[in-house]
Amino acid sequence: MSIETALRHFDWATLFVASEWALRIGALVYVPQRRPPNAARAWLLLIFFLPWFGFVLYLLIGRAYMPRRRLRVQKQIYELIRRLAQRPEAFDASLAAAASAELQPALRLADQLSEFPVTGGNRFELLPAYEPAIDRIVAEVDGARRYVHMLFYIFEDDEVGRRVAEALQRAAKRGVAVRVLMDAIGSRAGLKGLGPGLRAAGAEVVPVMPLRLWGPNAARFDLRNHRKIVVVDGACAYFGSQNIVSAHANRGMVNEELLVRSTGPIVRHLHAVLLGDRFLEVGNLPPESGDLTPAPAAAVLDGLAQVVPSGPGYNEGTAEAVMIALMYGAQTRVVLTSPYVIPSEPFLGAMCSAARRGVTVDLIVDAESNKPLVQYAQQSFYDTMLKAGVNIHRHHGSFLHAKHMSVDADVALIGSSNLDIRSFALNAEVSVLIYDRSAVADLVRVQDDYLRHCDTVTREERRALPLARRALENLARLTDSLL
């Protein structure tokens, strides 16, 4: 019998069915490993009903894996951080001066989980207005004498991106060391449109986490570097939620952000995060890394703050664990602001527990989102929150993209992390935990201003939802476990 005849008579249908069952059985063994039960169930259901589709999707986004090389280099970065950011012995004294006794366990947890210690002597200026914040960055770059280092998830080739790029080019041409890190996916337009001009002026442009589906540096394509950091001359740093992009980037919406300008020792720690990300891509440290070495100084108990990085390669769930602990220690009020809220069960439990204890828990979200599927999934949690007494406020008039938290009058957490699985476990993020009461008061004023532009979600409104809408919300909610 010829090969052609054999192939015509081969039972391909049986082979296909057998392959599907092989995938199902293999999934039962492999998928539940080191995975929360709800996520394992979601993946198993998908693979059981659509074996080949589920298998391919699982290969692409099923596990938050990082290449071995990146994990090895990450360990080298940890060792560098331990040498440069030694922990003070008087941590308990710092805590006593900074926060209530109820919040101190959460701050001790942060001290254990973060690679960086608490440091005093910092100052923070909150910049909630979009265009003035860009103006400050441009002015800072124009005043730079030695170096400008930037790391952004989105550095867009638009009027804002071009304006910042032009300032960077001016700095590079006058001899300032300019190094710009852009996420390879989020900033693909900036890398293509602005990268050549920056390099021609003498700036270094580094794509961060470039897409590789195989090879020694292969990783999940949807694991992104979501950080936003600017460091100028080692004297000041910017962090927060704002990218280098027009406020009108989302069609029909105007972005509202929160950027923070900081001075003090915290600048060195934010710089270390940025240079660590650069080291992962290029394998060396630039001459400006000499600024990371701290000068001997007496302990300062005011302006206390701590850098809290998170994402693959860092302690798992760092930012989420700290936020949960803070909510359990809260005594009077917790305010959470985020455009995307898909909480894990522990996070949701902490929110609801705080509200049931009598703590005022205010969650500020957008009335209209640029990601409808995420918003549907987010709304599926509202009934549980409202039943526990959480106040849910819908912000109108802008797309509120800021991400921060205040607890009582003692602690604030400001950064790039949303309140969802992607930010807590998948993306590279950075937040700053601030124990300075004046900075916390400034943040509370910003949050209270948000509330003046909000309406409140009510239980009556939720009860009146049609069945089809509830079904859509619950279906969208299933996608969180597939991450």
Image: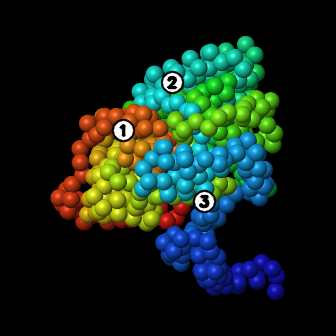
**Residue 465 placement (x, y as % from top left):** 22, 60
Element carrying mark 3: loop
Taking the spot 49% from the left edge, 48% from the top edge, the residue there is 96
* Residue annotated with mark 3: 316
Report the mark closest to the observer, 3 or 2: 3
Name which residue type carries label 2.
Answer: Ile
Numbered tag placed on residue 444 in the rendering: 1
* Residue situated in front as seen by the camera: 276 or 39: 276
* Residue situated in front as seen by the camera: 210 or 73: 73
Residue 126 occupies quadrant = top left
State whether residue 277 is above or below residue 475.
Answer: above
* Distance Cα–Cα, label 3 vs label 1: 29 Å
Name which residue type carries label 3.
Answer: Glu
Left or right: where 467 falls relative to 310: left
Taking the spot 52% from the left edge, 64% from the top edge, the residue there is 482
**Residue 284 placement (x, y as % from top left):** 81, 39
**Residue 441 placement (x, y as % from top left):** 38, 36
Mark earlier in primary sequence (1, 2): 2
Q: Answer yes or no: do the residues labelled 3 and 2 have beta carbons within 8 Å?
A: no
Q: Residue furthest top?
A: 174
* Residue annotated with mark 2: 134
Element carrying mark 1: helix
**10 Å crowding of disc 3: few (<14), some (14-19), many (20+):** some
* Residue situated in front as seen by the camera: 136 or 39: 136
State whether residue 157 is above or below residue 419.
Answer: above
Report the mark closest to the observer, 1 or 2: 1
Quick one: quadrant of the C terminus? bottom right
**10 Å crowding of disc 1: few (<14), some (14-19), many (20+):** some
State whether residue 367 is above or below residue 300.
Answer: below
Residue 66 appears in the rendering? yes
Quick one: quadrant of the N terminus? bottom right
